Amino acid sequence: METKTIKTLTLPVEGMTCASCVARVEKALKKVEGVSNVNVNFATEKVTLSFDDKETDILKLTSVVEDAGYKLIAPQEKEEVASKDSANMEPPEDLEQKKSYKQLKSEFIFAAVMTVPIMAISMISMTAWFQAWSPIPVEYIDRILFLATTIVMFVSGKRFFSITWRLLKHFSADMNTLVAVGTGTAYLYSTIAVLFPKLLSLTSSSGHIYFDTATTIIALILMGRLLEARAKDKTSTAIKKLMGLQPKQARVVRNGKEFDIPLSDLQKNDIIIVRPGEKIPVDGVITEGSTSIDESMITGESLPVDKRPAIR
């Protein structure tokens, strides 16, 4: 009988924007034959999964997640990122997050810079005094707005439409679909009103364009995601610093001898020796001795707390 070889991996997932995204990624992975356990964490944007490598592989899992509208960073990709930045000692997933954040920031800045003049021109061009004073016909101004909005839609708004298309192939939808439908409808209607007004029984496009609405929605949504990504990054950094306070090794007593071992090698019922001034590596029960422990990192209590063996 062939034995199963179960692997457990924790990999970054890009593109998740809400709780429904978590459920969608989990559902897609659980359908893969050989996958026994899936746990997606939205806060850390990572998935922990166990699978039989004889029934499936990373390429299959990556493809399934991509078909669902997201991106699973496989170990091979992480190694490639690390090799490109050999001088940088940061984890590959951190480099990917920074790359994604940088791209999101550039898309937001571009959308914001383009939206301000588009909105200003749209508002001003509808006033009677501007139409009477301006030497440029309103129809030409609308065409300029059409060109500017098209650039924003294809540069900053591309992410919403690409994700929506992938989701539609699976008869699914999420927040990106809402943004794509709203901005796409405003853009399409305004485009027809400007280029083919007769199709809408309009004598002119004046007062019937919503290019500013489409670009403003894209800019605001990107700003919200940028702020969310920044908050996640700060939280993740704080958690990593907190985890960094934990010792990497523990001093155990086995067969009457003391020696240091990595925390991952600790076993249940191990006897751990903690000397004065050292940090306690793991949770446990005091069996011998007494001391005062600084628990401020956990409880917020600034004064050391006396600890001794429990009375039985």
Image: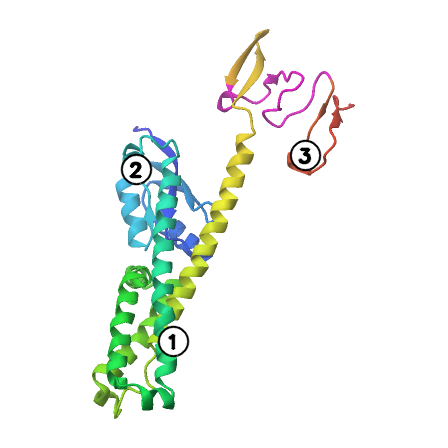
Residue type highlighted by circle 2: Val
Question: In the rendered view, does 76 fall on the left or right side of 311?
Answer: left
Locate the N terminus by quadrant: top left
Q: How many numbered circles are shown?
A: 3
Cβ–Cβ under 8 Å for marks 2 and 3: no
Mark 3: which secondary structure? helix
Colouring? rainbow
Q: CA distance from mark 2 to mark 3?
A: 38 Å
Residue 153 part of the magenta segment = no
Which quadrant would residue 48 be assigned to in this image? top left
Residue 283 part of the magenta segment = yes
Q: Is residue 287 above or below residue 29?
A: above
Q: CA distance from mark 1 to mark 3?
A: 53 Å
Is residue 241 among the parts visible in the rendering? yes
User: Residue sitting at 38 percent across and 76 percent down?
Assistant: 120
Q: Quickly name the residue at label 1.
A: 120
**Residue 5 rendering spot, x and y as whole percentages:** 34, 30
Which quadrant would residue 124 be assigned to in this image? bottom left
Q: Quickly name the residue at label 3.
A: 296
In this picture, which residue range is highlighted in magenta?
Answer: 262-289
Q: Quickly name the residue at label 2.
A: 81
Cβ–Cβ under 8 Å for marks 1 and 2: no
Locate the C terminus by quadrant: top right
Tell me which numbered mark, 1 or 2, is placed earlier along the sequence.
2
Q: Main secondary structure of the magenta part?
A: loop
**Residue 182 rendering spot, x and y as whole percentages:** 36, 72
